[in-house]
Image: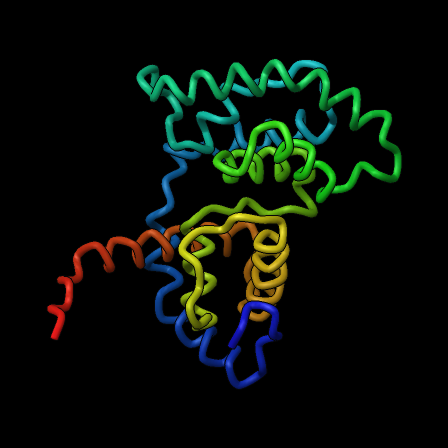
Amino acid sequence: MGMDEPIKAVEWQRVLNEVKATYTSHLVLYSYQKYPAHEYEGFKKTFSALAEKVDLSAALLWKWGHWGKDNFPSKQRLLISEIESLWPSFRRWALSAGAQFTPEATFQWWDKRLGRLRYITIAYLTHLIHPLQVPIIDQHNFRAMNHLRQTPSAKKKPSNWCDIVQLKLFLKEASERYQRPDSEFDKYLMMYGRALKSRKVRSPRKEQA
């Protein structure tokens, strides 16, 4: 089943059976100490309001899992500074763009200036600016989605706008079918995807014939 194909009813049953068997045990692994909810809600509020001053450093450290840490990679410090320098320009564009101020246009604006190697950060900024339209995406929930969908030859990491759209559609329908909030279901996907990665790392390599 390719990523562009809708999931059939019988396949949804298989997905939901796996979710039912793993949901609680993985959801409890999500750390609100590492990813504090109150601060995250504050980031979404200020970024989506296109506030003149937003706490980019705190917001990015939250996403990178460095909340409360002073020692994090210097390249990330440089990226924070770069994004801080770009925020006024983005804000001017967004406030004057009118109907062209869409989630995809926001993603493309940051992508053009930061480059493909910063995909996860670009997608996260787009999420904060359009929190109701764009989910957080990373390699973990992307891996979880592909595993649950049994996507053949799935790429390991998300890399473009279409991947965000696919995750949004899957997250919306899966959370509705499982009758849980999509924000909670996304946390499950994140932890389920992390467990899948750990499982693959621990698996011994097969010897070549």
Q: Quadrant of residue 109?
A: top right
Above or below — where is 188 with respect to 174? above
Name the image colouring.
rainbow
Quarter of the rendering occupied by the C terminus:
bottom left
Residue 156 image position (x, y, % from top left): 40, 55
Residue that appears at 62% across and 49% down = 161
Q: Nearer the viewer, residue 192 or 107?
A: 107
Q: Nearer the viewer, residue 67 or 103?
A: 103
Residue that appears at 17% across and 62% down = 203
Q: Is residue 7 left or right of residue 87?
A: left
Q: Nearer the viewer, residue 168 or 40?
A: 168
Above or below — where is 10 with respect to 100? below
Q: Residue furthest bottom?
A: 10
Q: Residue furthest front?
A: 209
Q: How many marks?
A: 0
Residue 100 image position (x, y, % from top left): 84, 39
Residue that appears at 50% across and 56% down = 185
